Amino acid sequence: MPQAMKSPAVIENAPESPVDTSDVPRVGARELALALKILSAGNGLLLPVVTLSDEDLRRVEQDFWQISPRARVRKVAVLLRFRSFLAACQTRHVSDLIARHGQMALVIALEAAANMRLNAKWGFNPVKMARAMSEALAATADGFDGQTAAA
């Protein structure tokens, strides 16, 4: 299959090649959650609205590199997405949603960060991330309302 036809989501069987930082491959939300759990030092999922030091980020990267059984390219993609996720959580739109909706918004933000297009130089578009989170939160609320009405 030509290079242009390969799915960016399939990097498990890809040869060891450098990660294209202009379009970082998609990863699993659980992998990002693992990095967040390492950052939280096992105290549940820490809300990533505080500014972190480079030492904290290095510790997460070193621990993730040791713990994760994935290929090198996949680990790099997860860590690039994780750094961009933390930066997006510092923006007003995303941090407000996380503050307002708590753990549910954090899980949805991790899912969005795992699947959104990412250019490592520019990071995630925080407006698009906030919109994706708002839509998912609204869909979740509609789902709960429908279950309550049916009961």
Image (tube, rainbow, N blue to C red):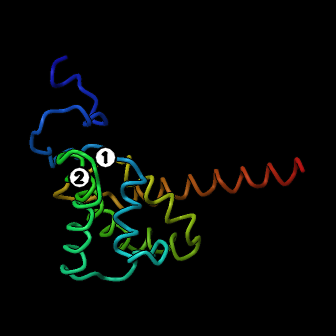
Work out whether 105 lies above or below 7. below
Q: Residue, x 26% and y 47% (percent of image)? A: 70
Q: Residue furthest top?
A: 1
In this orientation, which residue lies closer to the viewer: 82 or 135?
Answer: 82
Instruction: Work out which quarter of the rendered image holds the N terminus and state it.
Output: top left
Give the percent coordinates (x, y) of residue 42. Answer: 43, 75
Amino acid at the residue labelled 2: Lys
Q: Residue at x 57, y 74 (%)?
A: 100
Residue at point 53%, 77% (across, down) = 99
The answer to which of marks 2 and 1 sits earlier in the sequence is 2
Q: Quadrant of residue 48?
A: bottom left
What is the x, y in percent for residue 128?
40, 54
Work out which residue is located at the far right of the displayed protein and give it. Answer: 151
Question: Which residue: 9% across, 39% down?
Answer: 17
Q: Which residue is mark 2?
A: 75
Q: Position of residue 90 (x, y in %)?
A: 35, 74
Residue, disc 1: 117
Q: Quadrant of residue 5?
A: top left
How many C-alpha atoms fall within 10 Å of the one at disc 2: few (<14), some, or many (≥20)?
some
* Vertical order, 21 against 80 (above or below): above
Q: Amino acid at mark 1?
A: Arg
- Residue 20 drawn above or below residue 68: above
Between 2 and 43, the one lying in front of the other is 43
- CA–CA distance in space, label 2 to label 1: 17 Å
Identify the element where label 1 is drawn. loop
